Image (tube, grey):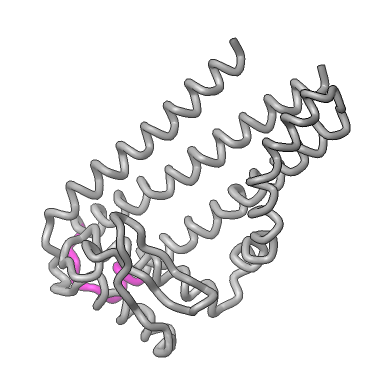
Amino acid sequence: MLYLLLIVVTLGLGLGTQALINAQYRKWDKVYSHAGLTGAEAARRMLDSHGLYDVPISITTGKLSDNFDPRRNCLNLSQSVYGSYSVASIAIACHEAGHAVQHNLGYTPIKVRTAIFPVVNFASNAWIVVLLIGIAMNLMDMVWVAVGLYALVVLFQLVTLPVELNASNRAMTYISDSLAMSVDQEKGARSVLTAAALTYVAAALASLLQLLYLVARAEN
């Protein structure tokens, strides 16, 4: 019953935050920005303002698939963001540019996230297998190993929160200081970024609840 409740809460958090970001994106994707820039142009200006002239901006496939790739030192914007003049597109593009700035400045949380990523990538795939084997063979040591692996996944998600929030703050600071957007449009950009941040908060909270459940089961 407790696990069923956990599933319901997790699904509720995920679906609720996803619906929120989709609603905010649709609303502000219809509003033409007074800045008169596309998402790519706004990101380019933000990168250049921080001396990141060597960071290229390319188009990637998928909806809201925008990201900064630190391995290639490249900003990837989805087609709908890259060439759009909307408030939503500028907010998203500048957010990703914020990640490039973090990487350039050696922002501590992003350095920690990058450092633990290989281990977390393994842990995210291995923990459930180790847990099932431990339960099937009644080996509590293996169950606790699985819990430890999952704890690394949760740690990664918790470290991701300040990374995403800081990137959004950098984006909003640049938008407010350097782009000719109205107060209402700035609020719209912040709404889009806040909704996006809540998806990370929801994912971290759901994972933390899952971890607490696993710990409770392992102790019984």
Q: Which residues are magenta?
A: 174-183
User: What percent of the width, then of the height, locates residue 200?
Assistant: 48, 46
Task: Pinpoint residue 3: horizontal percent, then vertical percent.
Answer: 60, 18
Q: Residue at x 11, y 62 (%)?
A: 32
Q: Magenta part mainly helix, strand or loop?
A: helix
Membership of 182 in magenta stretch: yes
Q: Nearer the viewer, residue 136 or 161?
A: 136
Q: Is the residue 36 above or below the residue 154 in the image?
A: below
| Quadrant in which the N terminus is drawn | top right
Quarter in which the C terminus is drawn: top right
Examine the rendered structure and indicate whether residue 80 appears above or below residue 3. below
Q: Position of residue 119 (x, y in %)?
A: 71, 57
From the viewer's perspective, tell me whether residue 102 is left or right of residue 15: right
Q: Position of residue 113 (x, y in %)?
A: 63, 61
Give the residue displayed 60% in from the left and 75% down from the top: 106
Report whether 190 appears left or right of 80. right
Residue 50 within the segment the image draws in magenta: no
Foreground pick, 23 / 191: 23
Q: Residue at x 24, y 58 (%)?
A: 88
Q: Is residue 153 left or right of residue 169?
A: right
Choose between 162 and 130: the one closer to the eye. 130
Point 85% across, 22% down: residue: 138
Which of 9/120 is in front?
120
